[in-house]
Amino acid sequence: MPLLTRTEEIILTAVIILKGNAYGITIRDYIKKVTGEEWSFAKIYDPLNKLTQKEYVKKIEGEPTPERGGRRKILYEITDDGISALKEIQEVNKTIAVDLKNTALGNL
Amino acid sequence: MKNKNTPPKFAVWLLSRFLFGLELSEKLGDLQEEFYYQQNNSSLFKARIWYWKQILLTIPVCIKNIFQWGIIMFKNYVKIAIRNIQKHKAFSTINILGLAMGMACCFLILLWVQDELSYDNFHKNADNLYRLVVTDGENYGSSSPWALVSTLKKDYPEFLKGTRFIQRTYNLRFGEKKFYEEAGLVDPEFFEMFSFPFIKGNPKTALANVNSIVMTEETAIKFFGSEDPIGKTITLENNGDFTVTGILENVPHNSHMQFDVLVKPAAIFSEQKINGWSYEGPSYVLLQPGSDYKKVSEKISNTIIKYDKRYNTSILVELQPFEEIYLYSLNGTDPVAYVYIFSGIAIIVLLIACINFMNLTTAKSSQRAKEIGMRKVIGAQKKDIVKQFFGESVIMAFVSLFIAIIGVYLFLPVFNEVAGKEITINFLSDKSILVGLLGITILTGIISGTYPAIYLSSFRPAQVLKNAVLKSGKKQTFRRVLIVFQFSAAIGLIICTSVILKQMEYIRSKDMGFERDNILRVTLDDNLVNKIETVKNELLSDKNILKITASNNLPLNVNSFNPFWWEGKEREDYESMMFVLVDPDYFDTFGMKMKFGRKFVENSKMDSSNYIINETALKLTGFTDPIGKKFAMWKNEGELIGVVENFNSSSLHEEIAPIAFMISQNTYKRTLFAKVDSKNIPEAIDKIEKTLTSFSPNFIFEYHFLDDDFDKQYKSESQLLSLLKYFTFLAILISCLGLLGLASFMAEQKRKEIAIRKVLGATVSSVVTGLSKEFVMLIALANLIAWPVAYYFMKSWIESFSFHTDFGFEIFILSGVIAILIALLTTGVQAYNAANKNPVDNLKCE
């Protein structure tokens, strides 16, 4: 399996953090919080689709609410595969961070 | 929820085009929630803008997604299709072969039709070109008076350009080389009107001089080889020397104007003649773009009446659009009818092939039922199954296309031979063929896939997975209907072919009213025409040459109308009749019998202004005692001295025309007919050649047999017939292929039933009868449908001939019996194989 992209990593993290309340709106809010950027929904759905195809997340049907025009929520939940993929990228991130510290840049 | 304003409806609708079900409600729900939030924080307008932006950004993602899934499913469909083809090899072979044959047939006909329709459309000015035709109200003629073009150009501004195009065969000589070539006598504007491109020479000046000649590349190579032809001098029969001033590209085969060389009319005929009002050949004009030719036609219709004061004529001028010349004949059957007939046959043959596919696929359906059940359980919807089976039939169609193209390439030379065409295929240069092929392939896939797709997708998963037997009475009925249709078409084709065959046989053997066996036809040159009497006497001295005569016309092809007057009519009140110039020995040579009166007397001046007419002409005059009555063509008054029995002068499609005969002066008798002894034909031909060349050293001896000329008249019909024969054969073959597949499948399905029957004591023959009975019944039913339809079409076709045979019931019965026998043979072999197996093997399996 190829490594997760940065976007996928952030979205997976969001799904974990949001614990059972991860859907379009909340994921987008979380991304705004950590990156300070307002992403379009399209930019979220595309990686979410890919993650679903790779079975890193699964979809759960939520209850319909009036502010959604009576439409059901789709909640996302991380799978075991998703967790191990996230762990893998975390390892890489850690290694990169350590390597970086040992260079001149690390002392800045 | 302070504000009840909803998101833009159109944007919601737009997204719902790309997403479905839960996917859609997820996105719309998320967006709507955020939309209200935005709306409360800023303005409604900004929220709407934001919503639109989000929707438009989401759509590309959706499309990408659809494609990803589409490709995954497509791969699966292709894989399953290939597995199915491999699993049932014999079955797939029958299926694909049938389709391929049907498609190959269709392509060949498509090529033929395209070729027919392509006639004369290569001219840049084709839309504004017209031929001048003349009519007496009933008959049309393509020959127009010499002076017509120049008169029209002078009188009406709509006529931009015009040319005459007189076709003559001349003997051309260059040094030792001499050939007969087709010459076109044209005016210099010819090159500005028609797109016959020059390879060498200047179109503007090429025919500026009277002694200039322009020739096609092919002709130039024949005479001059690799030398530069420009400036060379070539001799044209007795008309002097001509200088080559231009070389044209060869005339395309799909041009109705064919020629090898072009010269000016003035090079051959006198000024007086070419500015007069006699008829020699067709004329063409170029109209101002945008003119309404019907209106112009009306305006000019009286031109001949206005200018040709020689007699009180009632001949009108009309314009015929250039592109119609080939497909629509002036009199009689239009060749365009054949284009329709063959297009119809193409569709029928393709339909027969498609029906095979439908029948075989649905027959096999029980074997795919579980697959469909599984797909549905996993979540495939009806439309997905439909898509899958359409996909499968389109894949089959493309495999067939590949085989069909190979077949077309292999059979094209044979096809060209049979159809008398020079069709070549070039996919790269001709996009329309490519589009046509793809179109037919996809159409075939869709037609043959529709029924299986609808039928198979309607399976209920629970039933098929429980292994419930498919109770499918409806399916059986539909399959039967298809078989009946298929065989009705095939039987109809057999009947039509038989009737056409019978009619052609009838024509060949019909007593034309004159003899045409062992008669040689030779076109004379001017030297021989001048010495015709001496030539004739010299030839008659040979014992192998029985009779000899010279005339201006073939008895087969009498087509020059002239005005006639006879006793009892008002002066200046003319009626048109055919007119033939003959020798006194004309009637003897062709074995024509006199009804009344006498023939012309040999070597006598007394008959020089007398006439002989045929029976139709006699009826027209209404004379009961014609001999000695006054009779005149134009103003040449003479007496009627005899009436000859009717003979068929032109196509048997037409009634016998009224004809008047007159003794000719030598100059008009350019055709020599010699009746030779059938036992010594080569010697006779040798003698004629030697005699003629001794009188005219430069003469090129070419001869034709009159019965060959006769056959040539029915060439289009006999070509149609042989094409029809092949296509009928193919239609039957394809139908039988389908029947073969079905029969083998049924024998396979009923193998246990057969085994049990045999165990209980059934004989092989009773099993075979049981299996074949249904098919025979269906084909018997197909007969009942095919007969009236074929009868209707053949009745109207055969009545287009003035002389036709009758077709009785025997043709219908025979065609039906042939179809049943073929079907019986096809299914019988399968049934026999099944019935001959050891019942133990069939019962113990499973």
Image: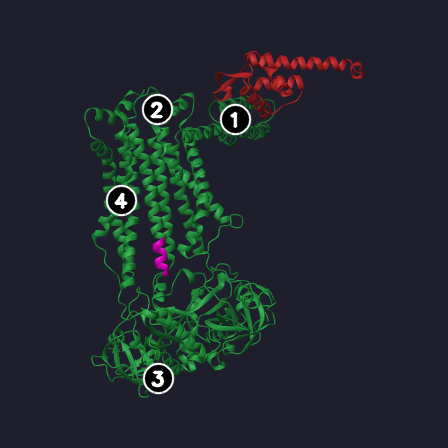
According to the rendering, which colour does chain B have? green
Q: Quadrant of the C terminus of chain B?
A: top left
Q: CA distance from mark 2 to mark 1?
A: 45 Å
Q: Residues within 10 Å of mark 1 (few under 14, many from 20)?
A: few
| Viewer-nearest of discs 3 and 4 | 4
Which amino acid is tagged 4? Answer: Ala
* SS state under label 3: loop
According to the rendering, which colour does chain A have? red
Residue B268 sits above or below residue B21 on the image: below
Same chain for labels 4 and 2? Say yes or no. yes
Q: Is residue B546 magenta?
A: no
Tell me if label 3 and label 4 are in contact, CB under 8 Å: no
Q: How many marks?
A: 4
Which amino acid is tagged 3? Answer: Lys
| Residue furthest to the bottom | B605
Q: Is residue A10 visible to us here?
A: yes
State which chain disc 2 sits on. B
- Secondary structure, magenta segment, majority class: helix
* SS state under label 1: loop
Between B687 and B429, the one lying in front of the other is B687
Q: Which residues are magenta?
A: B715-722
Q: What residue do we see at 30% from left, 28% from top? A: B749
* Residue on which disc 1 sits: B5
Please tell me in which quadrant of the rendered image residue B642 appears.
bottom left
Between B569 and B187, the one lying in front of the other is B187
Please tell me in which quadrant of the rendered image residue B771 appears.
top left
Residue B590 sits above or below residue B610 on the image: above
Q: Position of residue B8 (x, y in %)?
A: 52, 30
Same chain for labels 1 and 3? Say yes or no. yes
Q: CA distance from mark 4 to mark 1?
A: 73 Å
| Viewer-nearest of discs 1 and 3 | 3
Nearest to N terminus: mark 1 or mark 3: 1
